[in-house]
Amino acid sequence: MSAAEVAVRADAALGEGPTWDAEAQRLVWVDILGSRVHTYAPASGRRTVMTTEQHVGAAKPRAGGGLVVNLRDGVGLYGPPGSGEAFRWLHREPVPGRRANDAAVAPDGSLWFGTMRYDEAPRGGTLSRITPDGAVRTVLDDVAVSNGTGWSPDGRLMYYIDSPTRRIDVFDVDADGLPYDRRQLAAVEDGFPDGLTVDAEGCVWVALWDGGAVHRYAPDGTLDRVIALPVRRPTACAFGGPGLTDLYITTARTGLDAPHPLSGSVLVVPGAGKGLAQAPFAY
């Protein structure tokens, strides 16, 4: 396997949420504390930056173009560039001291969006689902730092991380797309599990905050691969590129007295594996 390379050299305070936009053949990622949504097209090298009015936990492609964003005060929509579609709130629920964090789109096109308190207080965050018709349901209301969420290739399992628990959990998924029977898939000792992605073989790749690595776990929870990184705080990972074989990794520099020169950049491991195509938000 190739070593990590630099995809996008940047100084993001808290780079997060890499997502491959298959329609546009580009990577979408955010700087949460910088209130910016970034894109990067590997084929051309073209980059764009959009500033949001609030801290942005995640940005995901929408069906038909545009983005859905998980902002401090709720979930909002941006139209495609040049469409003239103004930003609008889809779900607004401001809570003092709380902000958005990671989000993911389920196989059915619903958005699962997390929140957390700025002070990371226990039970201060949530994990909620918003369906394509705009209906919102809070699924977990007792998390501290809501992070990685993903689904098995057949959609029958959901993986989830509440970072301070240092666990990767797995749920069964019912016919309505809701999780049940939560249990531990794996425990993390080196650092804190952050964002995750699931590959075509059903293995779970997890970025380790303060662990300086990405781990790959087999479906039975066995650690079967470690990618060491030059930075201390990788935050999330996602497969991208034309064949979904390149692993992109966002990183952070916030809270570090002497961050590595690549902290805040996006790294890539070419040919790391084979990812799953991700559904856009169906709204």
Image: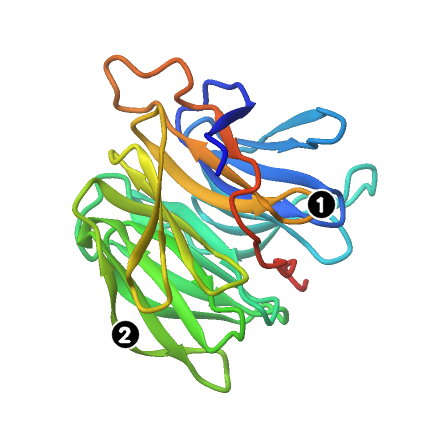
Say if residue 54 shows up in the picture.
no
Give the position of the C terminus as an image quadrant: bottom right
Residue 270 at x, y = what percent?
Answer: 56, 36
Tell me the SS state at disc 1.
loop
The residue sitting at 56% across, 47% down in the picture is 239
Q: Residue 182 carries which label?
A: 2
Quarter holding residue 109: bottom right
The residue sitting at 27% across, 39% down in the picture is 118
Q: Which of these two is toward me, 53 or 66?
A: 66
Real-space Cα distance between discs 1 and 2?
Answer: 34 Å
Give the side of residue 51 with respect to residue 98, left or right.
right
Residue 222 at x, y = what percent?
Answer: 28, 61
Label 1 vs label 2, nearer the camera: 1
Q: Which of these two is toward me, 139 or 105?
A: 105
Q: Which of these two is toward me, 14 or 119?
A: 14
How many callouts does the rendering have?
Answer: 2
| Applied colour scheme | rainbow
Give the side of residue 245 with respect to residue 228, left or right.
right
Mark 2 Cα within 10 Å, few/some/many (few <14, many 20+)?
few
Instruction: Identify the mark nearer the N-term, 1 or 2.
Output: 2
Residue 195 at x, y = what percent?
Answer: 39, 47
Q: Which of these two is toward me, 254 or 158?
A: 158
- Identify the residue position indicated by label 1 in the image: 242
